[in-house]
Every structure is written in structure tokens, then in C-alpha cells.
Amino acid sequence: ALGLDLCRGSLPEATSVDLSKVALVAGVVDGRNIWRTDLDAAIARLDDAKALHPASLAVATSTSLQHVPHDTALEKWDDPVLDANLHAWLAFADQKVAEVVTLARGVRQGWDSISEAVEATREVLAQRAAAPGVVRPELRERVAKLTEADRQREDFALRDELQRERLDLPLLPTTTIGSFPQTTEIRRARAAWAKGELSDADYAERMREEIASVIRLQEDLGLDVLVHGEAERNDMVQYFAEQLDGFAATKNGWVQSYGSRCTRPSILWGDVVRPHAMTVEWARYAQSLTSHPVKGMLTGPVTIIAWSFPRNDLPLAQVADQIGLALRDEVTDLQDAGIAVVQVDEPALRELLPLDAARHGEYLKWAVDSFRLATAGVRPDTQIHTHLCYSEFGQILDAILGLDADVTSIEAARSRMEVLPELAEQGFNHGVGPGVWDIHSPRVPSVEELTELLTLAAESIELRNLWSNPDCGLKTRGYAETEESLRNLVEATRIVRAQLEN
């Protein structure tokens, strides 16, 4: 038997393969998304498969069903209209199995035997296309009017000069990627708030207490650019999805993320609009507590798409631009609130790179374009950061350059800075923060180890462009190891500054 993913792949040419002795398993029900299958499209694929004259034809999902939640019957969305719509539009694992059974019956008994199911699906798909919020004409018009100028900032040399004057940072500035440890107390407060056991005011006060504690800690440690710690965020994508129109969050839609960790990807079902500011009040409060710059923290368009279940009725490039416009408005509001540094994270940039090398250029163009759309609306003296997670950076070096972020932080501790010579060879002259502490381990790096890695980084990156930071966010770490590691990082940075300035 030969199994084929016919949702992302295609059938071989009839003349190129002899299937007369092979059973063909046609994966026509998408195992990677959560949308009801278009049975007409699936039938067309199965007819094409029959035309290859395999020994027998079986119907299957395109992949295993570990990528999708279990059963839509376990869900109830708060909005009654959305609740009814999503139950009709979605197919989780149980519903996908039912679709496979329906299509298999059609293969055996003829398509007329499933005509009722096909007609019901047509009606649902038509209803979905016409449902309020799926298409927002005013947003589509805004996207259509975008020009290249909307994705361009002033020349980096000018930005760099103005940002150095505004921020007045030392050489080799220290910072963290964004999140601080999410303690049991924080999680309990969020759970109590979600259940209605903690009022909005009490929850907000609890989060402000945590933010104030994180700011004091960073000042005591001697960090240069601070973060508010993201205590209020359940997840770096879900937090935004819950506030953007066009998204829905499941309550029981768990899927495996990695190892034993699971996540509940949000469902991107309609056009994306930001009805209100999402992060500004937290950032403004944090900045009011310190004279150090505090970074505004956002998740980028590509990562929001990658770690959600995106809609399948609109090209991802257009979805990314919609999210980019929502983030552009948020970035501008952060700037207007006095935030001088805004970080837009794209840890999934490499993750969505197609396996087919011929499609790399198309993907990287819209990925880079959506980031630039999100970040190009600010003044030149506002510093834009981004963060990229572990990957083969060599494959996306052009995209990293294309993002045109003022500072790019990357995970580099495990590889001992191997990506930096490649960046230098490409003429990368923006700020870069190669992570020197691998936060995926509870091990506390020594001052000597961190000093060695920073010195190694300085061999490829000009000191005036080099930053000192951990590899990634600190959400999964404990406070004891976090404090000790950051203390060592600051001390190692002081040592390297003294060595290289002389």
C-alpha cells in the first residue's frame, strides 16, 4: 500500500507509475487543520486517484490526528452565534474520522450514496463564507491600499543615531527576551480570575504587584533594558488571539506541542481586527516604575499564524497582512504611550518555511513583508527588536536581513555563536543579541562561561552592535536559577566591556 498526503501533495502522473498491484491510500481529509472538509474537492481528488487504476483505493486523513483536538462536542464558545457557527464549520479528530467513513462509503457504493452529506457540507461552507466577520470590507480595503512605502522605515544609519541618543545605553547593553518565571501563584490567580473567583480589579492588582516585583529585580541585577515579565499572559499567541476579532480560543482543544507539553492553538476563523489596545496599559505601568527603558512585547504575524489553526479560505499572505495591520496599530499606541523599545517576536519564522525549496522565496517575502508592515509605522527614534528561536538560520539569513529590525536576538548558546560569522559575511550591521545562556536547561551558567561566549560573539559582531541576553524567554524557569543566571550574565558583560573598551 502507498499512502499519499493529497492535501499538501499531489498524485503522480498516470504514465509515471504502475499502481495496478498497489493499494492506494488517499489522504484527502486534512489532518493538520480543524476545518470541515470540502467533500466536493475530496471527491474530485478521489476520482483522480481512481483514474490511476490502483489495485484498490482507500480513504484516509492526510496525516495522523495528533495535530488536532479530540472532539468539537467538548467545546462551547461564549458567543452563542459563534458557538453555533464553529460547531458547524469545524472538524476535530472525531469529526474527521466520520468524514473518512463517509467518503469511503462513496468510494464503495458510488457518490450518490453520500449525496445528502455532500449537500449538507455545501450549505455549511456557503454559510461560513457569508457569516458576519468572515469578510470585513473595510479591512479588505485597507489591505488593498497598502504600498511598499507602508513597509519601509527610514535608513538604519539615521535610526541608529537617533536611538542611541534617545536611549543612552552602554556598550553591550543587557536585556532579557521578554517573559519572567510564571509562578504557581500567578497561574492560580489567572485560573481563579477565569472562573470568576477573582474580580477584574483584584486580578489586575495581582498582576501589577508581579510586574513591580520584576522591575525591581531587574534594576537590582543591573540590567539596562527591562521587560515587564508578561505575568498577565497565558500564552504568547493565545493572549493576543483572545483580544483580536476573528479569533476564537478553545477550552479543551489540547494538542501536543513538544515533549510532554501541550497547547491549545487558537482558531483564526475571520478577518482580523484589533478592537482595542492589548498591551499598552501594562507597558505604561511598567515604564512608570523605572527610568530604564522597558520593552513593549508583541508576537509577530507569522508566529501567530504558525501557532494557531489558521483559516483555509484566504491566502496566508493576506492573513499575515491583516495581523500586521493590527500589530502596527498596537506598536504605534505603545510608542505614543512613551515606550521607546518595542519587540515583535517571530520565533516561528523558520518553522513555516516550506519543505519545497522552490516555494521558499514566496513564503519569505510575505513573512518579511508582514513583519515590516507591523513595525514600519513608528518614528526613527523608536527601537524595534525581534527574537528568533532555534533553527538553521543559514537558510533564512536573507529574511533576517530583510526584517530590518534595529536589534535581532537569536538563540546561539548551544551552537557557540556559529551563526554570527554568517551574519557578518552577509554585511549585517544592525544590532544583534546572540543568546549566551541556554534557558532550556535549569543549569546556571558560570560567569566564565558567559564571558567566553560574549568574547566569541565580539569576534564577529562589532561591539557597538552587540547585545547581551539569554537565548529565550524565562517563563519556564524558576526564580532562584533566573536570578543567579542573570546576575552572572550582567557580571560577564561588565568584564567583556572592560576588556574590549581598552
Image (cartoon, rainbow, N blue to C red):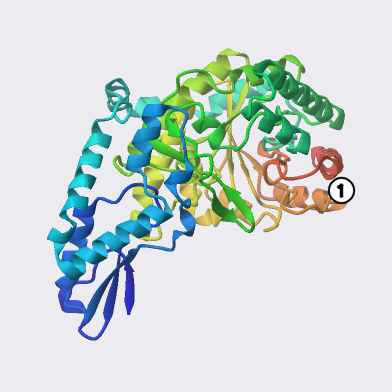
- Residue 152 in view in this figure: no
Query: Which quadrant of the structure image shows residue 464?
Result: top right
Query: Which quadrant of the structure image shows residue 178?
Result: top right
Residue closest to the eye, 199 or 320:
199
Residue closest to the eye, 342 or 67:
67
Q: Is residue 245 left or right of residue 224?
A: left
**Quadrant of the image for the N terminus?**
bottom left
Circle 1: residue type? Val
Residue closest to the eye, 274 or 115:
115
Residue at x 57%, y 19% (from the top left corner) = 334
Residue at x 59%, y 23% (from the top left corner) = 279
Residue at x 50%, y 42% (from the top left corner) = 303
Image: 347 above or below 211? below
Query: Which quadrant of the structure image shows residue 270?
Result: top left
**Quadrant of the image for the C terminus?**
top right
**x, y (%) of residue 118?**
19, 51
According to the image, label 1 marks what residue?
447
**x, y (%) of residue 250?**
50, 39
Crowd rating for badge 1 (residues with CA inside 10 Å; few <14, some 14–19, many 20+): some
Image: 83 above or below 54? above
**x, y (%) of residue 100?**
31, 61
